[in-house]
Image (spheres, helix red, strand yellow):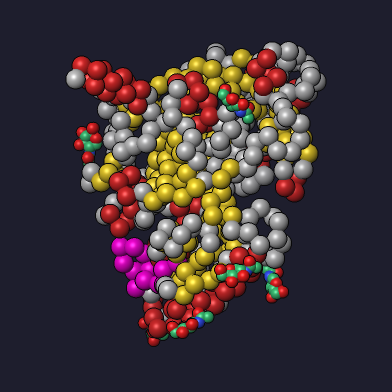
Amino acid sequence: MLFRFSFFSVFFLCSSAAVLSPVRHDRSTGLYSLSICTKTPCQDTNLLVDLGSSFNWIDCSHNYTSSTYRSIPCTSSLCNSLGSHGCSGDCSGNHLPGCSKNSCFLSLLNSGKRKGITKALALIDSLALPLTDGRNPGPLKNFPNFIFSCSATPFFRNRRPKGTAGLAGLSQSNFSLIGQLSKQFSLPRVFALCLSRSPSAPGVAFFGTFGPYYFHPLVELPKNLIYTPLFMTNPAAGGGETLHRVSDEYFIRITAIKVNNFVINVNGSGSDRAMLSTTIPYTTLHSAIYRPLIEAFLNESAALNLRLTQPVKPFSVCFEAVNVSVSRLGPLVPTIDFVMQNPDVFWRVHGSNSMVRILNRGVDVWCLAFVDGGNKSRSSAPIVIGGHQMVDHLLQFDLDSKRLGFSSSVLVHNTMCANFNFTVNHGIR
Ligand SMILES: *[C@@H]1O[C@H](CO)[C@@H](O)[C@H](O)[C@H]1NC(C)=O
Ligand SMILES: *[C@@H]1O[C@H](CO)[C@@H](O)[C@H](O)[C@H]1NC(C)=O
Ligand SMILES: *[C@@H]1O[C@H](CO)[C@@H](O)[C@H](O)[C@H]1NC(C)=O
Ligand SMILES: *[C@@H]1O[C@H](CO)[C@@H](O)[C@H](O)[C@H]1NC(C)=O
Ligand SMILES: *[C@@H]1O[C@H](CO)[C@@H](O)[C@H](O)[C@H]1NC(C)=O
Ligand SMILES: *[C@@H]1O[C@H](CO)[C@@H](O)[C@H](O)[C@H]1NC(C)=O
Ligand SMILES: *[C@@H]1O[C@H](CO)[C@@H](O)[C@H](O)[C@H]1NC(C)=O
């Protein structure tokens, strides 16, 4: 009995070091940013959320002032573990007072189109995030020795939301946000994302906790998570052993897509890997999947008496909004299921996630929010699931068990990701 009691109290102490961050949607780019506190004194800093990035990038092209900032000596073992190759820094791209030839510069391996090496100054500064019990944020927890990379280049590979000063990497890398948080505080390597498109209330990211996560009106979200294996690119593959990748993406298997009950085979494109990406707003499909999906979607919508309109780019199916009925789960259109390792495991996309409203200069339409990725077979993956399809789903990335837990649309449970209670509870420790 005594043993049990102490076991539970130890467990409780550990699990309460979990932290969170609000995650905001940016309308003009369709992308998401999370906010952290960096530097000393602590400054609120918005970083683009990038599931695939191996490092956290911070802009130091403008004045960088912090009393806790340190550069890393290029001869240190930390610098070596960061993949640096010798002391050959070039400080002309930043305005950091401590930058010199003897500072540590990362050498990162670009994959895909922009093959090659990216060099970036590594720096150490503090980072603070609110503790959480899954219900509220608590006091800030300070992480004093957080490693950032300082360069504008990698996070300009995509458009970035206004007001962001860098990028939060959420990949499995030891130097990503989750990698560093879990290492410094022995947290489990797990994080959960609940993205919101609400302009008034943010969604939330939880780090180092399996939950439960609570959303108003006290809905406990992880109860009915569905699990599918999570694949990650092999961190050691390609380049020298000590080179880290700029990006290191997450993949799941999608074996079929169903529109209502009509099954579309996705193997025509040669792979069943689907990448999860928060840096594209809409799911992008290889043409060999996109074309039959559109065909099936139109066919299955025929009974709904919707009026097709001139499509609005980049979409190819749009309906006049007046004819579309909207329910709690969004526009009433055929459901789209991403079927995974077996037919019982699927991610159901309701109208709220499959359609996007476009209201602009006399145009008022709902468009099918999927994009034709073309016929190139080896761009990244035939299916890249984008942010719009993740909104109001709880996604739990469990890196140690290599699995993704996902909920059905939380709208089904009468809540939404914008319903997290951000009132600070100072009692959390
Ligand atoms: C940057 O610092 C310099 C020197 O301290 C100052 O003159 C300049 O106004 C600062 N720029 C910004 C954008 O804060
Ligand atoms: C990450 O850290 C772990 C534990 O310290 C280590 O075993 C592993 O090799 C590291 N991974 C990489 C890619 O450096
Ligand atoms: C695709 O899957 C279908 C049904 O599972 C199968 O009959 C077909 O041979 C597969 N095609 C390829 C190219 O693998
Ligand atoms: C179109 O819909 C009809 C009736 O629901 C169905 O029998 C047929 O298989 C569908 N075809 C396609 C390509 O979706
Ligand atoms: C769509 O709505 C308009 C305006 O209410 C109506 O005139 C039209 O008949 C509707 N079209 C269909 C296909 O239901
Ligand atoms: C892909 O190929 C098909 C058939 O060859 C063609 O009809 C389609 O336009 C192509 N898609 C794109 C986006 O190029
Ligand atoms: C939000 O959390 C605070 C602090 O725990 C609590 O006092 C308040 O009642 C909560 N609000 C709602 C709507 O649940």
Name the quadrant containing residue 306.
bottom left
User: Over which residues does the magenta segment extend?
Assistant: 325-336
Outermost residue on the left side: it is 1
- In the image, residue 341 sits, relative to residue 402, either above or below, namely below
Instruction: Please indicate whether residue 310 sits to the left or right of residue 343 in the image.
Output: right
- In the image, residue 57 sits, relative to residue 214, either above or below, namely above
Q: In which quarter of the image is the C terminus?
A: top left
Residue at image point 44% right, 29% down: 188
Res. 166 in view:
no
Q: If the picture is divided into quarters, which one holds ligand 2? A: top right
Res. 421 in view:
yes
Residue at image point 79% right, 19% down: 86
Residue 101 drawn at (x, y percent): 78, 16
Instruction: Please indicate whether residue 59 sits to the left or right of residue 343 in the image.
Output: right
Total numbered labels placed on residues in the image: 0
Task: Between residue 172 and residue 306, name the one nearer to us.
Answer: 172
Residue at image point 45% right, 35% down: 190
Residue 148 drawn at (x, y percent): 60, 26
